[in-house]
C-alpha cells in the first residue's frame, strides 16, 4: 500500500508540475481536475465492466470519422481506436500477470481465421502488381485496420464473464439504439445532428463535417452513424434484442409493464429507422422476419400482427418516407432504374456498376487484385464505390475471398441456430441464441447493399452479437448442467419471465478485478 501511495503521489506531482510549466492555466486546471476525478472514481471507472460500457458508449454515440482527440500527431487519433488499444493493452497485461483473469473460448476463431487466410492468399498471389502500383502501404494498413476492428469481438467476448454482464450489454445496446433513433428523428425535424456537437462538451475536435443525402423530399438522418444506410442497419440489428428483452428482460419486473416499455422502445427505433429513408432496412427486416417465420412461426405471427397497424399508422403520418422505403418495391421498373443512376459515383448505381466490376473480376477470378488494393477515398483513390461488400470482396480477393467471407459471416449464425434448436438448452438461452442469429442474418442481408466493412459502427455491433453468441455456446447453462457450471432449477428454466439476472454481489470475484 505504501508503494502504491508513493507512486500515485509522484504521478500526481509530475502531472501538476507539467501542467504548471507547459500548459495554459485554464487547460492545466482542467487536466488536474480530470485526473483527480479519475483517481477518486478509479474503482468504478477502471474495471472490466466499466471498460465494456465505455467501449459500447464510444461506438454508439461518437460518430466514426467525425471526431479526433486534439493531440498534435501525424494522423487523426479517433476515440474508438484509443479505447480499443487501451483495453487490449490492459487485457494482455492482465492475462500475463493476473492468474484470475483467464482466456475465455471465442468459438468463432476458425471462421475468422478462414477469412484472414483467404485475404492473405489474395495478397500473396498479387505481390508483383501490388508492388508495381505502390500499394504495399495500403494493403498493410488494411490488414492492420481490420485486425484492430475484429479485436472488438475478442475484447467483448473476454469481458462477458457472467450473465449479468451479458444482460447489461444487451440492455445498453437496445436503450442506446433508442436514444440514437430519437435524435435521428430530431435531426430529421430540425436538420441538426446533435452528435456533431459533442465537441462542445467533450475534449474532441471535429475533423469531418456531415455530408448531405437527399431522398423523399428532405435530408436523410445520419445521427451517430457514418451514413443513413449504416444507421438503418444498426437500428434493425437492435430490434431482435428489444423483442427478446420484452420477454426476458430483468426490469420492469412485471411482464405487462416490461412489454409496454420495450414496445415503446421498438416503436422509437422503427421511427428513427424511417428517417434514414433506406430501402436496405426494408430488406434487412424482411430477411429477419423470414428467418423467424421459418424457425419461430408463432413469434413471427405475433410480430407481423403487431407490425401491420404500426405500418398503417406510419403510412398515414409519414407518407413520403414510407412510400419511398416500401412503395418503391411495388414498382420494380422504377426500382431497377434507380440502380442505374450515377454509376461509379458515390455507390449510387449498384446495377450499373455490376457490369464494369464483373469485367475486372474476369481478369482475376480466383484471387482478385489483392486485399486492400482498392483505394476508395483520398488522393490515391483508384477504384469506385460499389455499395456492395460481396462484390467488393470478389474484386479484391476473388472467388476464394468470397468463400472466406461466406465462412466468416455464416458460421456464427448457423452455429447459434443449431444451439437454439437443442433440447437441453433452457428457453431464455435458446431464444437469445436465436435472437443473435436473426441479428446476424440482418447484417448479412445488408452486405449486398453497402460497403459494410467500411461502416464501423454496424461492424462493431456485429462483433458484440458474436461475442454474446460465443458466451452462449461456451458458458450458458444447460438443463442438465455443464462442466464448471451449476445446473439451474427446472422451475426457473421453465418460466420464461425471469431474465439473465446480474450475478450476486461478491467481494472477490476474479472477473471484477480492476482493469
Image (cartoon, rainbow, N blue to C red):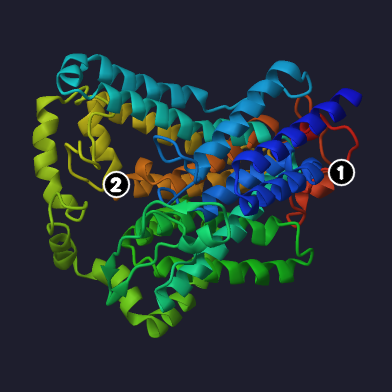
Side of 186 relative to 299 (left or right):
left
Quarter placement of the C terminus: top right
Relative to 355, residue 95 above or below: above
Give the alpha-carbon distance from disc 2 to disc 1, as whole Å: 44 Å
Q: Most extreme residue toward the bottom, as rendered?
A: 316
Q: Is residue 78 visible?
A: yes
Q: Which residue is mark 2?
A: 448
Is 464 positioned to the left or the right of 169 in the image? left
Q: Earlier in the sequence, mark 2 or mark 1?
A: 2
Q: Mark 1 sits on what residue?
A: 504
Residue in the picture at 60% in, 72% down: 264
Q: Residues within 10 Å of mark 2 (few under 14, many from 20)?
A: some
Percent coordinates x, y for residue 460 in the rendering: 49, 43
Q: Quadrant of residue 266?
A: bottom right
Decide which of 433, 159 is in the foreground and name it. 159
Residue at coordinates 64% horizontally, 35% vertically from top-left?
471
Q: Is residue 333 rendered to the left or right of residue 79?
A: left
Q: Nearer the viewer, residue 69 or 252?
A: 69
25 versus 74 height, above or below: below
**Residue 412: image x %, image y %?**
49, 35
Name the residue located 62 percent from the left edge and 33 percent from the top edge.
Answer: 87
For image coordinates 78% across by 30% down, the residue present is 10
Image quarter of residue 156: top right
Secondary structure under tag 1 reads loop
Q: Position of residue 302 (x, y in %)?
A: 55, 66
Rendered position, 248 above or below 264: above
Quadrant location of the N terminus in the rendered image:
top right
Q: Secondary structure at mark 2?
A: loop
Image quarter of residue 246? bottom right
Q: Mark on residue 12?
A: none
The reply to whether residue 418 is visible in this rendering is: no
Q: Nearer the viewer, residue 73 or 312?
A: 73
Amino acid at each position: 500500500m505504501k508503494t502504491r501511495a508513493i507512486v500515485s503521489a509522484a504521478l500526481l506531482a509530475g502531472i501538476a508540475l507539467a501542467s504548471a510549466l507547459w500548459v495554459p492555466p485554464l487547460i492545466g486546471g482542467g487536466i488536474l481536475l480530470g485526473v483527480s476525478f479519475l483517481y477518486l472514481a478509479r474503482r468504478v471507472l477502471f474495471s472490466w465492466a466499466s471498460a465494456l460500457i465505455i467501449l459500447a458508449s464510444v461506438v454508439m454515440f461518437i460518430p466514426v470519422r467525425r471526431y479526433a482527440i486534439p493531440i498534435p500527431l501525424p494522423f487523426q487519433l479517433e476515440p474508438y481506436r484509443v479505447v480499443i488499444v487501451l483495453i487490449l493493452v490492459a487485457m494482455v497485461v492482465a492475462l500475463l500477470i493476473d492468474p484470475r483473469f483467464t482466456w475465455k473460448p471465442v468459438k468463432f476463431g476458425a471462421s475468422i481465421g478462414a477469412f484472414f487466410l483467404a485475404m492473405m492468399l489474395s495478397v500473396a498471389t498479387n505481390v508483383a502488381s501490388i508492388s508495381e502500383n505502390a500499394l504495399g502501404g495500403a494493403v498493410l494498413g488494411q490488414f492492420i485496420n481490420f485486425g484492430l476492428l475484429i479485436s472488438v469481438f475478442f475484447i467483448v467476448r473476454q469481458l462477458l464473464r457472467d450473465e449479468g454482464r451479458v444482460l447489461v450489454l444487451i440492455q445498453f445496446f437496445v436503450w442506446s439504439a433508442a436514444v440514437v433513433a430519437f435524435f435521428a428523428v430530431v435531426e430529421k425535424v430540425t436538420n441538426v445532428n446533435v452528435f456533431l456537437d459533442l465537441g462542445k462538451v467533450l475534449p474532441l475536435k471535429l475533423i469531418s463535417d456531415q455530408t448531405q443525402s437527399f431522398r423523399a423530399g428532405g435530408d436523410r438522418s445520419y445521427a451517430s452513424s457514418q451514413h443513413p444506410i449504416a444507421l438503418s442497419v444498426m437500428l434493425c440489428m437492435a430490434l431482435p434484442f428489444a423483442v427478446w428483452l420484452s420477454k426476458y428482460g430483468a426490469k420492469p419486473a412485471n411482464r405487462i409493464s416490461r412489454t409496454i416499455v420495450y414496445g415503446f422502445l421498438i416503436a422509437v427505433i422503427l421511427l428513427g429507422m424511417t428517417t434514414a429513408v433506406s430501402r436496405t432496412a426494408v430488406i434487412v427486416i424482411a430477411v429477419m422476419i423470414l428467418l423467424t417465420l421459418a424457425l419461430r412461426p408463432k413469434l413471427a405471427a405475433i410480430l407481423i400482427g403487431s407490425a401491420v397497424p404500426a405500418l398503417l399508422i406510419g403510412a398515414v403520418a409519414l407518407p413520403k418516407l414510407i412510400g419511398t422505403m416500401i412503395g418503391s418495391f411495388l414498382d420494380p421498373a422504377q426500382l431497377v432504374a434507380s440502380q442505374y443512376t450515377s454509376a461509379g459515383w458515390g455507390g449510387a448505381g449498384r446495377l450499373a456498376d455490376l457490369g464494369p466490376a464483373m469485367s475486372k473480376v474476369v481478369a482475376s477470378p480466383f484471387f482478385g487484385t489483392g486485399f486492400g488494393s482498392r483505394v476508395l477515398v483520398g488522393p490515391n483513390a483508384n477504384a469506385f464505390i460499389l455499395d456492395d461488400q460481396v462484390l467488393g470482396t470478389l474484386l479484391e480477393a476473388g472467388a476464394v475471398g468470397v468463400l472466406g467471407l461466406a465462412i466468416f459471416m455464416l458460421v456464427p449464425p448457423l452455429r447459434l441456430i443449431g444451439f437454439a434448436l437443442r433440447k437441453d438448452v433452457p428457453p431464455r438461452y435458446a431464444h437469445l441464441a436465436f435472437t443473435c442469429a436473426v441479428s446476424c442474418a440482418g447484417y448479412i442481408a445488408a452486405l449486398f447493399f453497402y460497403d459494410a466493412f467500411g461502416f464501423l459502427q454496424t461492424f462493431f455491433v456485429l462483433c458484440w452479437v458474436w461475442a454474446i453468441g460465443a458466451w452462449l455456446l461456451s458458458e450458458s447453462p444447460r438443463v442438465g448442467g455443464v462442466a464448471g457450471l451449476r445446473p439451474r432449477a427446472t422451475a426457473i428454466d421453465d418460466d420464461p419471465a425471469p431474465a439473465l439476472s446480474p450475478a450476486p454481489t461478491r467481494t472477490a470475484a476474479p472477473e471484477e478485478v480492476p482493469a
